[in-house]
Amino acid sequence: MKSSINVAVIGAGIVGASIGFYLSRMGAGVTIFEKNEPASGASGHSFAWINSFNKTPRSYHEFNHNSMERWARFERLLNHDIGLKWGGNACFTTSDSDGHRLKQNIERLQSWGYPARLIEKSELADLEPGLKIPSISAAGYTWADGHVMPERVVKACINRIIETGGRILIDTYVDSIQQNSSSVYVITDKEKHEFDVAVIAAGVNSTELGGSLNLKLPQRVSPGVVIKTDPMSNLLKSLSVLQIISGEGEEHQIHIRQDKDGVVMIGMGSQEHELTDDSQSHAENLLLSASRYIPELKNTKAIPIPVGYRPMPVDDHPIIGFSQKAPNVYVALMHSGVTLAPIVGELASIEITGSGIVETLSPYRPSRFSHI
Ligand SMILES: Cc1cc2nc3c(=O)[nH]c(=O)nc-3n(C[C@H](O)[C@H](O)[C@H](O)COP(=O)(O)OP(=O)(O)OC[C@H]3O[C@@H](n4cnc5c(N)ncnc54)[C@H](O)[C@@H]3O)c2cc1C
């Protein structure tokens, strides 16, 4: 049965856009409120690696893995080129201790049913012929990983929402949300709007917005920096992500990807590495480190991207579900929102329209913070 409810989604990042898209497919009336431009928050600063490489415990790993499997359907439903690039992630290390940890991680991933295995240097060279590979202690390959271009995903979702009668109000700041027994009110800097349900998908600003309803959505500050290049010809021929866990003299690991437009993005440290240095000199140093392994990168210049802030619940796990304090308000706040966008959009829309309660989401309920 199609839904006829009227839903406000606050935030046009990849999470809000996916929820809005799946809601509109179920017949709901969708209005997205966005204080800036779509994908101007974390989604526009993301490395956007679709993976479950380092996610624990097992239930959270499976949640991410399940979402990875849904990306192909999401792309098909959006019917648009969203820059989805499969090919897997390969990683290597020159250090014995990191090599030992990598082997343990690959064993864990295999035992949890994730496509992962150790590979030899020769196979790595076959995967990426342009790679200059040092003497390594271990290399791993997780071939179901991918990456995507979040701005394109957000745009495609919004286009589909509009086609089905929904709307997006950009440059519209939501000051607060109010609720009575049957409705919620979204108060913007311009006017007051009435809805059946409001979804808080405002990324790092969700905590402040939840505060207007006395909801506790505790986050820690998690800045992240990636750099990019101008479009280049095919540097990474098969992989969607390459990670140098430890190489020759770098203090931190490096991760590299090349999108469908040829732009190379490079990040330092793990996916959760916290960094605020978005200077030109940091960008140049990072490019120089990466060019030790992909010499072609010496022929381009480093372009810094301003620091981005990850939505990051204090226990690192998503906050998804109706609030107990404000029962018509649904929360969707998470790190790894790029990996998780398809599963969160599909499952949250089932709950928001009142079609059912999804047990898979039970570890992530907002009520786990009610004691704070
Ligand atoms: C450097 C970096 C690297 C990352 N790498 C990865 C990765 O490799 N893989 C992965 O899966 N994830 C990664 N992430 C995390 C991922 O990008 C985020 O989890 C995801 O983008 C969150 O999407 P979102 O829609 O929840 O939030 P956002 O994209 O931040 O969207 C929230 C939107 O709400 C709007 N908004 C906020 N407050 C209001 C208000 N009061 N009124 C109206 N609008 C409002 C904002 O303007 C914003 O557009 C990374 C993040 C960063 C910063």
Image (tube, rainbow, N blue to C red):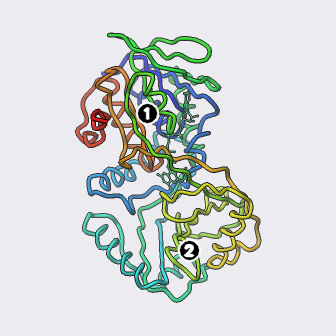
Q: Is residue 30 left or right of residue 172?
A: left
Q: Position of residue 152 (x, y in %)?
A: 59, 43
Q: Which mark is residue 114?
A: none
Q: Secondary structure at mark 2?
A: loop
**Is 330 located above or below residue 147 in the figure?**
above
Amino acid bearing label 1: Ile
**Is 96 located above or below residue 285 in the figure?**
below
Q: Quadrant of the C terminus?
A: top left
Q: Which residue is mark 2?
A: 251
Q: CA distance from mark 2 to mark 1?
A: 39 Å
**Is 234 located above or below residue 95 in the figure?**
above
Q: Position of residue 126 (x, y in %)?
A: 52, 81
Nearest to viewer (mark 2 / mark 1):
2
Q: Which mark is residue 19?
A: 1
* Residue 300, quarter of the rendered image: bottom right
Q: Quadrant of the N terminus?
A: top left
Amino acid bearing label 2: Glu
Q: Is residue 287 visible?
A: yes
Q: Secondary structure at mark 1?
A: helix
Report how many numbered discs are placed on residues in the image.
2
